[in-house]
Image (spheres, rainbow, N blue to C red):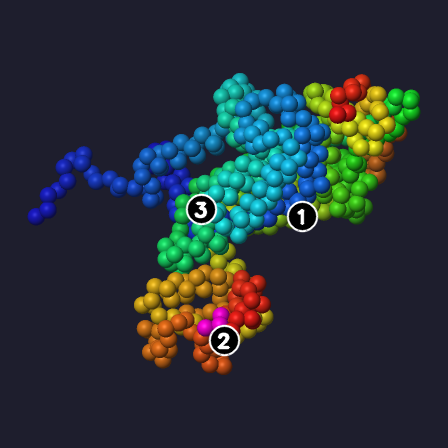
Amino acid sequence: MPKAPKKGNVPHPRRLFGLKKWQYLALNIFIVFHILAITAWAIPFHSQFIVDCRNVVRPYLLWTGLFQSWDMFSPLPKATNTYLEAVVIYQDGSTQMWDFPRMELLSLADKYSKERYRKFVEVLLDDRNAALRPDVARYVARLPGIRAKNPQKILLMVKWSNILPRGDGTYLRTPLDEYVFYRYDVQPEDLQ
Amino acid sequence: MTARSFSTPWNSFFFAQQSPVPVALFRIIYGVVVIATAALLHADWLAWYGPHSWISAATMHLVEPGTRLNLFSVIPQTDFWVRALFWLLIASAACLTIGLCTRLNTVLVFLCLTSIDQRNLFILHGGDTFLRVAGFFLIFAPAGAALSVDRLMRIWRGKEGRAIRPRLPWAQRMTQLELALLYLVSFWWKMKGGAWLEGTALYYVFHLDEFQRFPIPSFFLRPAVLRVGSWLTLAAEFSLGALIWIKKLRYPLLAIGVLFHLTLEYSINVPMFQWDVLSAYVLFIEPADLARVWNWIRTHSAKYFAERLTVIYDGASPRQTRSANLLQAIDIFGRLSLVDQRESPAHRGGEKLQVATSAGVLRGPHAARALARVIPLLWPIVPFLAFRRS
């Protein structure tokens, strides 16, 4: 007659879902950590607890590239059409306008391949990214048609027009306004 | 609530083994959208990432400090190496698409993608972010377990049979959760601004010059229609994030999601974003339903193919069995019937695979040509077979 198992000595399966127990445990830790870390990072909720959580997971999410934000057109969509131009002032006093690619003026194929410029312009116009502007001015100064003519100054200028809705569904564009938001003196080494 | 009442659905969700076909299909679509993303950037690889790019690596590091997984920080800063990194991404994504050295290529694609994103964070859109995060979880998924060259090689080596073995779906679930989070957080952000609740948000979106792609009929630009559109956007994003987990609602919601993204693809110029997101929809389809859909396609495409062929193999021969298994794995349109000659005395007598057609039994190159004609995956080799001597 087979012996009954002793009390408290219930046989455990050696594997869970085909995994060794340590693998199962490690996977669960991995899953829980990533769900919590990514959620804490992404949600638009700024309590002290969430901010603390973000600070804890920040190095890992930045290192792996798992950081993310999903705030396109929100909380409020832009209500302004903006266009970025560079004004190049040459040594002889002449000037030239250089337009950043404008999506609405591009062919369909170019709209697909040059869309990154739309995002880039949006970022450049944000004062929190002012540190990027010297690089941008230098890049414009180095453009083949500009470098050859010895540029002295690069001005970054934004033109904008507000979108004003009318009751009948049409909309009104305010006249274009413009503003130079960055000036850069080109150094000889910038043109190397 | 007991620990068991929580752990049972948890385990069932993350660890109950299931067919890897959905994740394999995702791998294929993912590989294609990664190639498309790199190709669309091609003209500006050096402008955005080169040694003399719009934003230098030094400025990038200054503005976005921190240790990051970024191959650009280890490769020489020359045009050649920047181009090489992109070609590596494209080659890895192509291998990933066909499922060749799948695990290695999931790692390479993720490394290249995250490096490209980290090198210039100021030109990214949500699609890039989703590809990056999904790419991370794809590393851990059984992406090469089905519909892959890797599987064919395993079959040929006798390590795998005809049936596709179920696998742990936890990495697939993480990508599903990421997609749901994308929608829920988008919804949450929109709820924080008055314009979406008032219904005026889409009015501005559709009047921003930079986003316009194709002309929108004036009917859709009426305030009342745009108001409804703004609210429908909120409803769609909430549903796709929260209600997608309710099985009965899943397919109608996926259909709404497809319509939603195709509408955005038509009207708003954010290249690849919609396709990046839609690529992961396949992960929400039950493997049994995928099989049903494929069977429907098989049945309805039968008339476009030549006659069904019967492949006769000797089950006692490991080589012939492997060949038969391999043929069945690539016979995606179900044009072959496999018969083990031991079980069918009428077909006995061959040392090689034989192919029975209405015209008789074929062997050798004749059999290979007949097979290549009815199996689309073999069509590329048809011209080569034509020159083989009988």
| Residue B351 in view (yes/no) | yes
Task: Please give the residue where the numbered disc 1 appears in the rendered image.
Answer: B262
The spot of residue A42 in percent (x, y) is 56, 29
The spot of residue B111 in percent (x, y) is 54, 36
Label 2 with label 1: CB-CB less than 8 Å: no
Residue at 31% in and 68% down? B316
Label 2 in the same subunit as label 1? yes
Quick one: label 2, few (<14), some, or many (20+) residues within 10 Å?
Answer: few
Disc 3/disc 2 C-alpha distance (Å):
41 Å
Which mark, residue B206? none
Q: Look at label 1 and name its amino acid.
A: Leu
Q: Classify B15 as above or below B368.
A: above
The spot of residue A152 in percent (x, y) is 84, 21
Task: Please give the residue where the numbered disc 2 appears in the rendered image.
Answer: B390
Q: Secondary structure at mark 1?
A: helix
Chain under disc 3: B
Residue at 37% in and 54% down? B159
Task: Please give the residue where the numbered disc 3 appears in the rendered image.
Answer: B142
Label 1 with label 3: CB-CB less than 8 Å: no
Q: Please tell me whether mark 1 or mark 3 is closer to you in this view.
A: 3
Which sits in the foreground, A83 or B331?
A: B331
Q: Please tell me whether mark 2 or mark 1 is closer to you in this view.
A: 2
